[in-house]
Amino acid sequence: MGQSHSFTAGVANLRRDNVVNHSCRSMEAKDPKELRVLLTETKVDDDEQEWGSGDILILPDACLACIFQFLGSGDRKQCSLVCRRWLEIEGQSRHRLSLNAQSELLSVVPSLFSRFDSVTKLSLKCDRRSVSIGDDGLILISLRCQNLTRLKLRSCRQLTDLGMASFAKNCKGLKRLSCGSCTFGAKGMNALVDNCSSLEELSVKRLRGISTGAAAEPIGPGLAALSLKFICLKDLYNAQCFGPLIMGSKNLTTVKLFRCSGDWDRLLELVTDHVEGLTEVHLERLQVSDAGLAALSRCQNLEILHILKTPDCSNSGLISVAENCKLLRKLHIDGWKTNRINDEGLIGVSKYCPNLQELVLIGVNSTRVSLELLATNCQKLERLALCGSETVGDAEISCIAEKCTALKKLCIKSCPVSDHGMEALAGGCPNLVKVKVKKCRGVTGDGAGWLRASRGSLAVNLDTTEVESQDAASDGVVENPSVGSQVGGDSNVASSSTSRSTSFKARLGLIAGRNLVSCTFRKCSSFTRNR
């Protein structure tokens, strides 16, 4: 960050020096438009050729392009204003581009991609109230960017199956695709998986063009099945039409299913019959039961499992996973306060999963009995979150403080814990570096302050002022915006915001819908994602 700031300052000085030198030879050039001409003028006269050998203008194009790669979008824009040479180099070396994908974009596509002719990662986002780019625009972009490897589409409602099919034929090297709130259907998706043999990651959210019921056209497997490693499906009425693609992807390692309708037990059984290398599975608000978890237990390489708001899952299914998936490192459970997963299931985890490093329990009534066994048997446990539990009190916190010697980060939310629990933490968990306590009415500022004072190196975050809104049973879960492929970057073309964060509705949804997992580890710390 410091290097970027210094370089930006150097660019500003370079532009200032150019103005000074030109002004010395032409004192009449005081108009801002004339100064801009002077700044972008590439002609170098004899006096400028006598500058010292350390001048930045003597750097070769390849070196400048390499330097630009280390700069942020704003700094790159500033550099492109130094002179025409820098403008060309900055455009030719830019690989990421994010554009406002309104229909007006079509008219500037040729000139835009003449400048940015090396783009490999493209994001097209349109406001839901605007008319998006259509098939003609996407096809033209695909002809200009045939080396595209990542594409992100948001609210491009004018795209159809025909446009996606043409795009897929022109950009066969695509590796990552993320689409949300688009209206093309199964034919367009099939064209992609049939033509893009290098596709590794696929994220689909609210794809409204897919038919429902018996008329739904199956998707896949296609050529992409040979390379796909990551599939994420969200908010789909008929996500099960992706079944052939999931089953046919032999190299698949990660499957994430969020709020997709239908019974998933049978499909999970078929998937685990065909795919043996799954290491990460997320199930959220799905109709899945212990039979589905029993199917997942065949994945002996499973390391990360999220079971969130699946009320039909119980201790039996969790134990079957624990018995067979002994490499499990991260386990997140939102019991939705159904009490179908409790001490019995957690004891099974403690018995069979010694490699557990991260455990998040939301709406799960665990007690000292299971927590003590987890602490004793799971010696690698470093991150623990206990949220919305009626049974986690001072005794359980004292047990954690005494037994969890490897614990580094702890989050406690909406539990009947008091200052006595904070006192216990002060003398235990020797490796603890961060504690977050939220909406625990028994914990006061004095208790948290005493904990800070007794362990100076410990970061303590106490939040008792937040209004009690909804418990873990009714909190909505919103997607993580880093899932799947995040194609970013800005261009010199103005891109209007497609976010609705300024609206009251979005702000309210962000507050009331933020999941407890996010508040646990996104705010408490940024954990390294290992897939």
Image (spheres, rainbow, N blue to C red):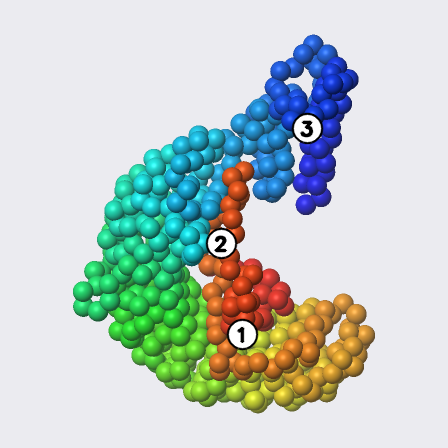
Where residue 501 sits, quadrant-wise, is bottom right
Nearest to viewer (mark 3 / mark 2): 3
Cα gap from disc 3 to disc 2, whole angstroms: 33 Å
The residue that label 2 is drawn on is 498
Quadrant where the N terminus is found in the figure: top right
The residue that label 3 is drawn on is 32
Mark 1 touching mark 3, by CB under 8 A? no
Where residue 208 sits, quadrant-wise, is bottom left
Query: Residue 81 at x, y = what percent?
Result: 61, 31
83 relative position to 197: left or right:
right
The residue that label 1 is drawn on is 512
Cα gap from disc 2 to disc 1, whole angstroms: 21 Å
Height in image: 485 above or below 110?
below
Instruction: Tell me the kind of residue under disc 2.
Output: Thr
Name which residue lies at 48% across and 31% down.
Answer: 115
Query: Residue 184 at x, y = what percent?
Result: 29, 54
- Nearer-N-terminus badge (1/3): 3
Nearest to viewer (mark 1 / mark 3): 3
Q: Residues within 10 Å of mark 2 (few under 14, many from 20)?
A: some
